[in-house]
Amino acid sequence: MKLAWILWLSHVLPQPAADSLCLSTTVFLEARDQTVRGQEAVAEVALRRRDSGLWGSNLCQVVTARHQFAPSLVSPQTNLANNDAWDTAIAVALASQRNWALPPRQRREIVPGASHFAATALVSPAWGNAYQVATIGDHTFFRVQKLKPHKS
């Protein structure tokens, strides 16, 4: 299936389902070749950003914010063709959302405080000198800014 179709679908689904679809898509595009732990870390960064409200109030807004995650960086014609990787990305996204719904002290955090990540062998982001939280696979996770939950 093509990314353009998934993004269209995320606009017509009810919000909880749309968020799960957007997070699954991001995990697939960003980390399908990583371990489950690496995929969980990517999901965690997106969930932490959603809570901050700085990139949007729901996961779809966060992961499609300009120049932030793969859904806004790759061609809409990108085909998400690896069914096994897609199934894993869905499972990781749903489990990550359940984990993140717990009270903060009960959550299992993979990359505490990480607000950004990059495959530093491929890119050198301007914020690449920020505090490194962890390296998992070929992604390095950074605390570029301290994100606090947005007060509703």
Image: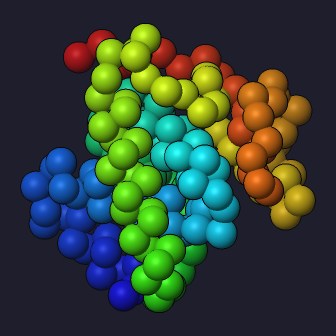
Residue in view at x 47 percent, y 88 percent: 81
Q: Position of residue 84 (x, y in %)?
A: 47, 78
| Quadrant housing the N terminus | bottom left
Q: Is residue 101 left or right of residue 67?
A: left
Residue in view at x 13 percent, y 62 percent: 13
The answer, for residue 80, to whether it is visible in the render is no
Identify which residue, 65 or 50, lies in the foreground. Answer: 50
Q: Is residue 128 left or right of residue 30?
A: right
Q: Quadrant of residue 151?
A: top left
Residue in view at x 40 percent, y 16 percent: 106
Q: Relative to 42, is 17 above or below? A: below
Residue in view at x 43 percent, y 11 percent: 105
Q: Is residue 108 left or right of residue 113?
A: left
**Disc count in the image?**
0
Q: Position of residue 27 (x, y in %)?
A: 50, 59
Q: Position of residue 89 (x, y in %)?
A: 45, 63
Identify which residue, 70 or 111, lies in the foreground. Answer: 111
Q: Is the image coloured rainbow, by chain, by secondary structure, or in one colour?
A: rainbow
Q: Relative to 148, is 76 above or below? A: below
| Quadrant housing the C terminus | top left
The answer, for residue 92, to whether it is visible in the render is yes
Q: Is residue 16 left or right of residue 40?
A: left
Q: Position of residue 133 (x, y in %)?
A: 75, 28
Q: Relative to 103, is 16 above or below? A: below
